[in-house]
Image (spheres, grey):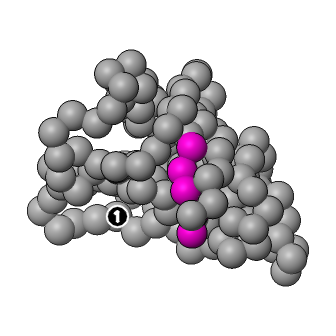
Amino acid sequence: MTDETPESLIPYDEIVQEALRAVVGRVLTSVATQGGLPGGHHFYITFRTRHPGVDIPAHLSERFPEEMTIVIQHRFWDLNVDADGFSVGLSFGGVPSTLRVPFAAVTDFVDPAVEFSLKFHANEEDEAPGPEGNGDAPKPEPVEDGSNVVAVDFTKKK
């Protein structure tokens, strides 16, 4: 027997990431259906701003060329969710804006009210090149702080 793990022909990491992103979709769908957040729940959603399908105002893409975190708590409107992503109205510096975010662009989803967090690996080959042209970004590290964080790392062992 060898200590090497054979390379999988089944894309487990992609399957798990897709399933976990479905959790985000289900939670946001529930909030949209109910017309608001229950109790003290609120969300921090971080996403890659250059991911295909992300639609945010130009002033926000200039300010956040790589990644942006939005807060869905007290003042949001028109939350719409479909199979591929969500759109939401938020105000930035008093300027109302509508954002469209595909689930594939989401890198973090946090509900601090219940210490729940999901971390995702961004699919960087789908990223549009930035001004520097490389699109490189640090990958999320697994979280081991005892909270309800789910982080899945399918890096190959050599």
Q: Quadrant of residue 35?
A: top left
Can you say whether 71 is above or below 142 in the image?
A: above
Q: In the rendered image, is residue 90 in sight?
A: yes
- In-front residue for pair 32/48: 32
**74 and 67: which is toward the camera:** 74
Asked whether 92 falls inside the magenta stretch, the response is: yes
Q: Is residue 36 left or right of residue 70?
A: left
> Where, by quadrant of the figure, is residue 100 drawn?
top right
Residue range in magenta is 89-93
Residue at image coords 21%, 34% = 38
Q: Is residue 133 above or below residue 142?
A: below
Residue drawn at x 28%, y 65% as measured from the top left = 143
x and y percentages locating residue 59 in the rendered image:
75, 68
- Under mark 1, the amino acid is Pro
**Location of mark 1 (residue):** 142
Task: Report helix, strand or loop for mark 1.
Answer: loop
How would you classify the magenta stretch by its main secondary structure? strand
- Count the numbered circles shown: 1
